[in-house]
């Protein structure tokens, strides 16, 4: 089949590489424009563009995909199929109707749960124990199209957004190839999504990483994992930004009413123990504003963190 591939993030890389080895024709790769990155703000390509360049594929990087120019270019490719994975722009119905067969999307959740841009992050933040991959036929409504294929995976207690993305990208590749075979053989089914149990996973904002110490330690632990590496779970200490990268929950009996959430009750090379709304959180790895990321045992050698000092 003649496929146009839409993708931008690392999550889509494994699937694109698999398509290149599948015998299908990739007539064009559509990805987001290069963006300024790093201290020098030099232009950086998307992960998908790098793969496409290495494979000598035609690349298209429109600022806006829903334009007459984009419509014309995509029609000229005469595609059988659009494959869309973590592209970063919403496609109009006019664009979705271009392929001769259909447009499909590979989504990182068990739809209809977690429609939107950050399903992997929000599944962890919300303490889900399972998630998965769903292949859908795309319609105008975001992530609401009928299901072609779906499979669930467990979320480990120590999974971060990075490790879970790696798991799901491998599963996405398997399901995509299976779906393409069923589409090519014309033996696939389109199963409408359930109307109930719909939830959304909007793009993360920096403020989403702010820690509310009144919440239970397990919720804060999930926030740290789900916001890694961006935007990062953060709080403040002595008016300096403090990012937390690794922590663990420490169940505890009822504490004195005089202790407030966010209060530091112990500092040692084993970690910084902080009161939360329920149980304690032991901070293991962090970064104080102006310093590099490090383990607590290293940080406390050169930076004073006092017991009784509140965070937040």
Image (tube, rainbow, N blue to C red):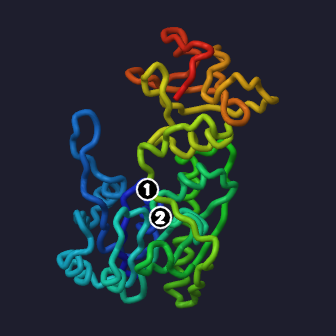
The relative height of residue 219 versus residue 131 in the rendered view (above or below) is above
Q: Residues within 10 Å of mark 2 (few under 14, many from 20)?
A: some
Q: Residue at x 63, y 60 (%)?
A: 131
39 left or right of 236?
Answer: left
- The quarter of the displayed image where residue 222 is located: top right
How many numbered badges does the structure rendering display?
2
**Residue placed most toward the observer, 138 or 116:** 116
Quadrant in the picture for the N terminus: bottom left
28 left or right of 140?
Answer: left
Residue 59 percent location from the top left of the image: 25, 65
Seen from this angle, which residue lies furthest front? 258
Callout 2 touching callout 1 (CB < 8 Å): yes
Q: Residue at x 51, y 44 (%)?
A: 227
Residue 16 percent location from the top left of the image: 42, 64
The residue labelled by disc 2 is 116
Q: Residues within 10 Å of mark 1 (few under 14, many from 20)?
A: few
Determine which of the numbered discs, if any, sits on residue 203 in the image: 1
41 left or right of 308?
Answer: left
289 left or right of 107?
Answer: left
**Residue placed most toward the observer, 157 or 254:** 254
Residue 55 percent location from the top left of the image: 32, 60
């Amino acid at each position: 089949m003649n496929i146009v591939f839409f993708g931008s993030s690392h999550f889509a890389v494994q699937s694109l590489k698999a398509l290149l080895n599948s015998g299908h024709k990739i007539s064009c790769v559509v990805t987001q424009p290069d963006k300024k990155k790093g201290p020098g703000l030099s232009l950086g390509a998307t992960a998908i563009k790098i793969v496409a360049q290495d494979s000598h594929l035609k690349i298209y990087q429109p600022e806006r995909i829903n334009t007459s120019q984009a419509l014309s270019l995509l029609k000229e490719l005469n595609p059988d199929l659009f494959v869309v994975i973590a592209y970063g722009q919403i496609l109009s119905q006019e664009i979705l109707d271009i392929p001769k067969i259909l447009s499909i999307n590979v989504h990182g959740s068990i739809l209809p749960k977690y429609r939107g841009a950050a399903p992997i992050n929000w599944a962890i933040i919300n303490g889900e124990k399972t998630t998965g991959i769903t292949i859908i036929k795309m319609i105008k409504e975001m992530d609401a199209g009928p299901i072609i294929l779906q499979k669930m995976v467990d979320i480990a207690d120590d999974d971060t957004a990075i490790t879970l993305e790696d798991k799901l990208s491998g599963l996405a590749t398997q399901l995509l190839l299976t779906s393409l075979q069923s589409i090519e053989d014309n033996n696939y089914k389109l199963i409408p999504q359930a109307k109930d149990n719909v939830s959304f996973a909007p793009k993360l904002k920096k403020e989403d990483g702010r820690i509310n110490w009144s919440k239970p330690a397990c919720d804060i632990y999930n926030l740290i994992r789900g916001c890694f590496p961006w935007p990062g779970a953060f709080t403040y200490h002595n008016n300096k930004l403090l990012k937390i990268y690794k922590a663990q929950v420490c169940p505890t009996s009822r504490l004195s009413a005089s202790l407030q959430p966010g209060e530091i009750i112990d500092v040692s090379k084993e970690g910084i123990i902080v009161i939360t709304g329920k149980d304690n959180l032991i901070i293991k790895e962090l970064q104080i504003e102006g310093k590099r990321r490090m383990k607590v045992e290293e940080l406390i050698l050169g930076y004073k963190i006092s017991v009784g000092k509140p965070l937040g």
